Amino acid sequence: MDEKYISVIDVAKEVGKAKQTVFKVLKRLGIESRKMRGPDSRGQLIAYITNVESALVKAEIQNMQGSESNISDPVIPELGVFYVVQLEPDHDPGRFKVGFASNMAERLRAHRCSAPFSVVLKTWPCRSLWEKTAIDSVCDGCERLHTEVFRIDTIDKVISKCDAFFSLMPCLQNSNEITQDSMPNQANSADAKSRAAD
């Protein structure tokens, strides 16, 4: 197979849109993604398209920018939460994952497929476009284990950096509804912190 592939998630990040927007454009263009296991997918099937198809999608999204037809499209969730998830509270308390989720409960379920003891330590209202900057900022000085997985001696340092980072960001409208569903395991986070301190 000579064709080179790129994940729909990576295409969405490159164009600064939600992946749902990319899937809508794929449907409009009659392009079908292929489910494959990638190097960063931890064995899960992820949607991929070819680089040629990616170029078509990017061109279509560029054409949509500011067009009237885009107004009639359903609103794609660009708001969500930035989260810190502790992956192994008992055995490796310094290993954590950070990222953006429009549905934290669903994201936590996905994480628990590979890390069944994961707990959400804290979330902050966030725009999807802030994710990369937030990760670069709050994980500076941490050991990178994977794309969004890090290790640090004390997770409280990361929580403090997140608090500081998001205190500087604009206050988001509808942050109440964002955070209502964003703490699926908040009760366990206190337990996780006390276990980490032991």
Image (cartoon, helix red, strand yellow):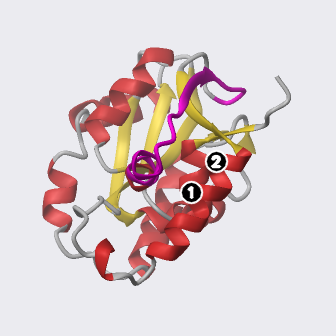
Res. 53 mark:
2
Residue at position x 61%, y 43% from top?
A: 148
Q: Is 46 drawn above or below residue 147 in the view shown?
A: above
Say which amino acid is labelled 1. Val
Instruction: Give residue 25's quadrant in the image.
Output: bottom left
Q: Is residue 152 visible?
A: no
Say which amino acid is labelled 2. Glu
Q: Is 126 drawn above or below residue 40 in the view shown?
A: below
Q: Position of residue 175 (x, y in %)?
A: 20, 66
> What's the magenta region?
22-40
Q: Which residue occupies the extreme front position in the image?
A: 30
| Magenta run includes residue 96 | no
Q: Position of residue 134 (x, y in %)?
A: 55, 64
Secondary structure beneath dot 2 equals: helix
Tag 1 residue: 57
Are there few (<14), some (14-19), or many (20+) residues within 10 Å of tag 2? some
**Separation of marks 1 and 2 at Cα, in angstroms:** 6 Å
Residue at position x 34%, y 25% from top?
A: 109
